[in-house]
Image (cartoon, rainbow, N blue to C red):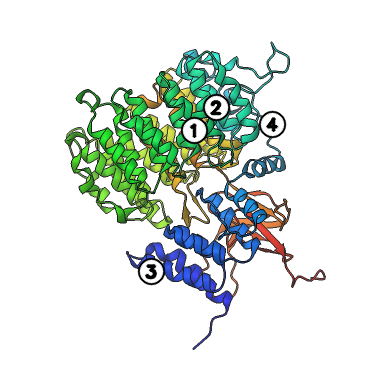
């Protein structure tokens, strides 16, 4: 019998690990467990950690970090944990030396994310701030209707606020909010805030958190200036901005908790919502028990407004996403059961089942949706069941039950069919074959489905191809953007922004530009077009909204939770187009730089040549086949598009990460000869 070498054995299990998603349950979990054992046996700890995260077993993660004796490999493992957005505290068993533990915890806390992102921006020379007019490119519409159209001023300014926030996300400077004031000597201008009305001020103030994204040190001081405002809407926006600023970053000083927790019980509902939503964004996936105590108290308050309670339910779902916390589960369930008859038909009520669903995101073995939803009112029961089912089975690939619910031809459609359609996308987005089949199924639902199904299909397509614009999906959404039903057109326009998010895709940008001319008299649809335009140019093309990483192998639960929350809000246009437009900022949970950045053994930036091209599946082929095709040579840091793979173009260094993505530590190759 042939004995496999370490390299061959590990290569064989790359195939096993990546093909496990095509196996039936529980065989897929057995295969992953076997892969984990093999990686641990050969001390390939980064790959073992990826398997542990895919299995969602915290004990395996602890075992990997405990068993790893190589400090460099342990640092690389911490970078993988940071990219997965998992809250993890190191103790003496995982890192005995205090200094080493501090460095490792700093990596997990994503403290250097802003620094790396700005380094990438400077290297690609895109630091110059852009204005909304630079994105609209209205000069290209000269001679067409709407080239200089003037819609309602407040709605126009609100749209510009979102575009400005998305385009300049994380750069620390823009031309609307942080620009120097002409009327004051060197101070920050707050004039733009007061060009918006009421809740528009909330979104405008919160956009400062987006512009200063991940830069906690200077960002908190900048936003803190607005907390002393006399305008409650500005204060609410500043609180929300603090949460956005700290999204995905953990600071030992906990500035978000310190600033926000005192505002949760204020009298003004807008301030309360700003603080509650800010806590949900800043502490998503952290299981913070102080936040649980504060927000569950709100859920049990019979005098609290419905919108405050609804956002508390969503924030609790985000903070405990995927953990199925019993206390939070009971609090949200009780709050939903005790809603009055007058509140049963309100769109905000649908956020309660979503909050419950987020608790069980990816936890199909711990939830029976049918049994769970029996205690609810008959009007909301089926909606709860579909929402819980789609969240529990996210990324598993089994969409049959959800498809069965969508084929029923109910009179005017069923409200519960909308989350079922979104569930198809959530479940099928794990791998390429299932994704393509789901797109075909959604095309059939679009042709034969009723009202609620047709409204949800564009959003499902947007989730399936997020930050990855496929030609056939782009064509479908472009067609639907002219649909006679306003809800379908709105969903299609938003989804055009989602599939092109962070890609600077010229074709989608052109479609949206033409739509801005087509809908120049429709204020609501034009508002959606502007948001989509901002998303396409997200971070000037440096950011992605895809919840998957490590070559589509790992799914970040917090990123998916942010996307799903935004999509559920979009199911009812009255929320985004009404006073809850700041729910757009839930997308910040999914924002990540789409970069490869190489660092040396001291974690300092290291520029090395790499080849970037389209990934090719060569598993099982003999010899040393090429793993990428159509590649180009670059110096790191580099951008990676959807489906791209990077390879080192030098043998001088050895990468410690199994996949060249995100932050990768390189060490000198002892076998490298300079006379090569």
| N-terminal label among 3 and 4 | 3
Question: Helix or strand or loop: what does disc 3 sit on?
Answer: helix
> How far separated are the C-alphas under marks 2 and 3?
46 Å
- Do callouts 4 and 1 mark residues in contact (Cβ within 8 Å)? no
Q: Earlier in the sequence, mark 4 or mark 1?
A: 4
Q: Which residue is mark 4?
A: 128
Which residue appears at 51% of the width and 39% of the height?
501
Q: Nearer the viewer, mark 2 or mark 1?
A: 2
**Which label belongs to residue 207?**
2
* Mark 3 vs 4: CB contact within 8 A: no
**Circle 2: element type:** helix
Reading the image, the residue beneath label 3 is 30
Q: Residues within 10 Å of mark 4 (few under 14, many from 20)?
A: few
Q: Are marks 2 and 3 in contact (CB under 8 Å)?
A: no
Q: Alpha-carbon distance for marks 2 and 1?
A: 26 Å
**Is residue 147 toward the left or the right of residue 609 in the image?**
left
Label 4: state its secondary structure: loop
In primary-sequence order, the first of circles 2 and 1 is 2
Closer-to-camera residue (21/381): 381
Relative height, residue 154 to residue 593 (above, below) = above
- Disc 1 from disc 3: Cα separation: 47 Å
């Amino acid at each position: 019998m042939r004995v496999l070498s370490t390299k061959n054995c590990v290569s064989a299990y790359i195939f096993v690990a990546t093909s496990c998603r095509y196996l039936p349950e529980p065989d897929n979990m057995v295969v992953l467990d076997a892969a984990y054992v093999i990686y641990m046996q050969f001390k390939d700890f980064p790959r073992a950690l990826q398997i542990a995260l895919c299995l969602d077993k915290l004990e395996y993660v602890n075992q990997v970090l405990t068993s790893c004796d190589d400090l460099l490999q342990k640092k690389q493992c911490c970078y993988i944990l940071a990219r997965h957005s998992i809250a993890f505290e190191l103790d003496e068993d995982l890192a005995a030396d205090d200094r080493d533990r501090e460095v490792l915890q700093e990596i997990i806390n994503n403290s250097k994310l802003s620094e790396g992102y700005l380094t990438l921006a400077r290297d690609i020379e895109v630091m110059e701030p852009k204005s909304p007019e630079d994105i609209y490119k209205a000069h290209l519409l000269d001679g067409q209707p709407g080239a200089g159209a003037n819609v309602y001023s407040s709605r126009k300014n609100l749209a510009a606020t979102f575009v400005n926030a998305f385009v300049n996300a994380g750069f620390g400077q823009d031309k609307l909010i942080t620009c120097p004031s002409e009327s004051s000597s060197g101070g920050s201008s707050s004039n733009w805030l007061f060009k918006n009305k009421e809740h528009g001020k909330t979104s405008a103030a919160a956009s400062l958190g987006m512009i200063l994204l991940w830069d906690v040190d200077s960002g908190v001081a900048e936003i803190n200036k607005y907390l002393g405002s006399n305008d409650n809407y500005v204060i609410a926006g500043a609180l929300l901005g603090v949460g956005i600023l700290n999204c995905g970053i953990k600071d030992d000083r906990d500035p978000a908790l310190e600033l926000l927790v005192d505002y949760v019980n204020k009298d003004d509902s807008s301030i309360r919502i700003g603080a509650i939503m800010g806590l949900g964004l800043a502490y998503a996936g952290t299981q913070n028990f102080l936040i649980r105590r504060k927000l569950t108290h709100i859920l049990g308050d019979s005098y609290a407004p419905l919108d405050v309670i609804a956002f508390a339910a969503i924030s609790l779902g985000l903070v405990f996403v995927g953990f199925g916390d019993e206390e939070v589960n009971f609090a949200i369930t009780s709050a939903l059961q005790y809603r009055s008859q007058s509140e049963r038909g309100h769109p905000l009520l649908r956020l309660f089942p979503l909050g419950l669903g987020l608790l069980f995101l990816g936890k199909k073995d711990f939830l029976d949706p049918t049994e769970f939803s029996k205690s609810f009112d008959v009007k909301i029961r089926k909606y709860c069941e579909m929402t819980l089912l789609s969240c529990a089975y996210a990324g598993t690939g089994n969409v049959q039950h959800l498809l069965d619910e969508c084929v029923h031809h109910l009179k005017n459609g069923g409200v519960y069919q909308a989350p079922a359609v979104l569930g198809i996308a959530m479940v099928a987005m794990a791998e390429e074959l299932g994704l393509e089949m789901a797109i075909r199924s959604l095309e059939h639902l679009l042709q034969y489905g009723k009202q609620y199904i047709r409204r949800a299909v564009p959003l499902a397509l947007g989730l399936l191809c997020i930050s990855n614009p496929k030609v056939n999906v782009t064509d479908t959404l472009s067609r639907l953007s002219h649909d006679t039903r306003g809800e379908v057109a709105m969903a299609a326009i938003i989804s055009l922004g989602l599939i092109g998010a962070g890609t600077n895709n010229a074709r989608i940008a052109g479609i949206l530009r033409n739509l801005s001319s087509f809908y120049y008299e429709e204020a609501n649809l034009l508002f959606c077009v502007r948001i989509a335009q901002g998303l396409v140019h997200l971070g000037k093309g440096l950011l992605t909204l895809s919840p998957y990483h490590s070559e589509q192998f790992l799914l970040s639960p917090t990123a998916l939770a942010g996307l799903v929350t935004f999509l559920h809000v979009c199911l009812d246009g009255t929320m985004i187009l009404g006073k809850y437009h700041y729910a757009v900022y839930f997308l910040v949970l999914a924002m990540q730089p789409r970069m490869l950045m190489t660092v040396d053994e001291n974690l300092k930036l290291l520029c090395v040549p790499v080849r970037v091209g389209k990934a090719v599946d060569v598993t099982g082929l003999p010899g040393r086949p090429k793993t990428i095709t159509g590649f180009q040579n670059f110096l790191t840091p580099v951008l990676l598009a959807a489906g791209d793979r990077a390879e080192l173009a030098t043998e001088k260094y050895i990468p410690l990460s199994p996949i060249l993505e995100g932050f990768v530590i390189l060490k000198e190759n002892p076998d490298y000869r300079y006379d090569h």
